[in-house]
Image: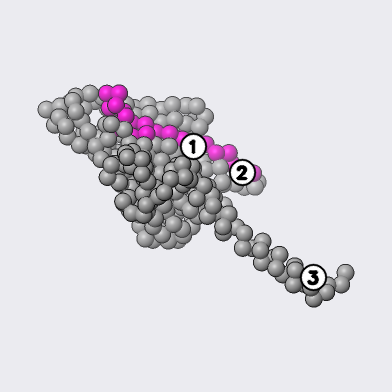
Amino acid sequence: MDFTRRDTLAIGAAAAAVTALPMPAMASLTEDAIAEFTGGADVADGGVDLDAPEIAENGNTVPIEVSAEGAAAIMVLAAGNPTPGVATFNFGEGAGAHRAKTRIRLAGTQDVIAVAKMADGSFAKTQKTVKVTIGGCGG
Amino acid sequence: MAKGVRPRVKAPRSAEAGEVVVIKTLISHKMESGQRKDSDGNTIPRSIINRFTCEYNGAMVVDVEMHPAISTNPYFEFEATIPEAGDFQFTWYDDDGSVYEETKSVKVG
């Protein structure tokens, strides 16, 4: 089969399009999760405290802490994991503070996102990049 | 039921009325993510605890929805208000339908 100059250009362009695909696909999974949680409402930046290490040596267990004054629920997402969902904390009437600590798995260096649903129905978001030396997804 | 599951909870034995106390919980569980493969290349099926709740005298303190990105031996730390003497009820829900429970009593005064 002979490749014309035109064919070669077309193949090259197609290959470039395919390699560019995975990144937006990953980002949209995270955006879908946020949209599902907020129901499409606007999300303000800030208003949520997310405490995570800048560098995590072991991605299998990364300590994080989330808190948001007056939050009814806080969702934590890891944008770079195979599935972005990490946990959703729903605070009840017996909660002493809207704060929780846990340990999570991170597949690699990525952004950890916390989205809080406030008692008045508004939403707030914060994110932090965590560098991971050893990923936590087995394999 | 996953093997060797043991819940552990650290809560104060007594508190002042209205005091906010810190609760720490840990449960031993493999939390198999469903992403790993065994030596033959077969995917190991997901087996995690997918929900954890804590109630005090029937009032919800925290209800956590969990995904595979929660580490092995899930650990949680949070705060609860103690309005009067009573019991904490901690419940973990496994993917396989098992439910693990633990209770802690708190005295006031």
Of mark 1 and mark 2, the one earlier in the sequence is 2
Highlighted range, magenta: B42-63
Judge whether A27 appears above or below B13 on screen.
below
Task: Return the chain for callout 1.
Answer: B
- Label 3 packing within 10 angstroms: few (<14), some (14-19), many (20+): few
Residue under label 2: B43
In this view, the residue farthest toward the left is B109
> In percent of the image, x 62 and y 47: which residue is there?
B39
SS at mark 1?
loop
The x, y position of residue A25, in whole percent, is 58, 54
The colouring scheme, among rainbow, by chain, secondary structure or one colour, is one colour
Seen at 36% across and 44% down, the residue is A122
Q: Residues within 10 Å of mark 2 (few under 14, many from 20)?
A: few
> Which of label 3 and label 2 is nearer to you?
3
Task: Give the alpha-carbon distance from disc 3 to disc 2, as whole Å.
Answer: 40 Å
Name the residue at 43% across, 45% down: A41
Q: Position of residue B78 (x, y in %)?
A: 29, 40
**To which chain does the residue with label 2 belong?**
B
To which residue does mark 1 refer?
B48
Where does label 3 land, which residue?
A7
Quadrant for residue A95, please give it.
Answer: top left
Q: Kindly report the distance in space between the C-alpha atoms of the residues bearing marks 3 and 1.
A: 50 Å
Task: Give the answer, above or below, for where A59 lies relative to B58.
Answer: below
Q: Amino acid at mark 1?
A: Ile
Mark 3 and mark 1 on one chain: no
Residue B69: give its label.
Answer: none
